[in-house]
Amino acid sequence: MKPTVSVVVPARNEEEMIGACLESILRQEPAPYEVILVDNGSTDRTGEIGRSLGVRVIYQPKPGLHIARQTGLEAASGEVVAATDADCRVEPGWIAAIQEAFSDPEVVETYGPLEFFDGPLFDRLLSRYGYPLFLSIMAKLGQPNTAGGNHAVRRQVALEVGGYDVPFGEDLRLMLKLKQRGKIVYTPKAKVLTSGRRLNKGRWKMYGVHLKNIWARLRGAPQDYGPDYYADRERQ
């Protein structure tokens, strides 16, 4: 029997992108067991848009990506909790690929590729072809590179190890804990498109942060992670 999948989306002042994100999740076949939007203290229409689309909206006023992710993990009722970000759009077959991965009872986490849906052509091509190649190579080397915008965890095990418990690198920290409990697998079919808005502050600045984060992953050092994806969102 295929596991039930809850989808959690943390969001802070995302009225421009949250609608497309949620709609892409709601179009999935098979449908997710539930969709949870964690409104992380937004001052715009983020929560209102979520409610208009019929998803469950949880208001979490305390800012912090790890806090929003943990709120969603604890509130979810599916056996598996899949995560994406508000500026993402999940591709068809995302839920199906996640369910297929978790059909192996030893799997505790799965992750897939991210590709820019906008921005300069160079960066879109790099994300389309280069990033999946990198993920595939690293997976074969036994070095999973999970990303907050496209990963899924077995809920009960994730809660048992403490969930998302650090301000930056919360996805890496959780992965390191889960790695001690079971298999972590790369699932190329679980594809997510994401905004290239981080490129607005400079291509090499963005890639510099990602290279630093990759090095932190390889060393198992979540404390050395760069700013989270809320970095370009207005903070209170």
Image: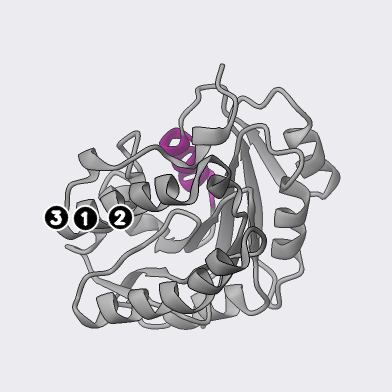
Q: Quadrant of residue 103?
A: bottom left
Q: Are marks 1 and 2 in contact (CB under 8 Å)?
A: yes
Q: Which residues are magenta?
A: 65-76
Q: CA distance from mark 1 to mark 2?
A: 6 Å
Q: Main secondary structure of the magenta part?
A: helix
Taking the view exactly as shown, the residue that stands out farthest to the right is 52
Residue receiving disc 3: 219
Q: Is residue 49 left or right of residue 85?
A: right
Locate residue 178, reporting x and y percent. Answer: 25, 60
Where's the C terminus, which quadrant? top right
Secondary structure of the residue carrying numbered label 1: helix
Q: Residues within 10 Å of mark 3 (few under 14, many from 20)?
A: few
Nearest the eye: 142 or 79: 142
Q: Secondary structure at mark 2?
A: helix
Where is residue 99 drawn, in percent x and y? 51, 77
Would residue 153 appear left or right of 231 to someone viewing this image? left
Specify the amino acid type for callout 3. Answer: Arg
Kindly identify which residue carries mark 1.
215
Q: Secondary structure at mark 3?
A: helix
In terms of sequence position, does the residue under pointer 3 or pointer 2 come before the other?
Answer: 2
Please identify the residue farthest to the top as the structure is shown: 236
Please tell me whether residue 143 is drawn above or below residue 46 in the rendered image: below
Residue at figure coordinates x 45%, y 63% from the top left: 152
What amino acid type is highlighted by mark number 1? Trp
**Residue 97 visible in the current orientation:** yes
Residue 2 showing in the rendered view: no
Report which residue position mark 2 lands on.
211
Q: How far across and how far down the image is residue 72, in percent?
A: 52, 44
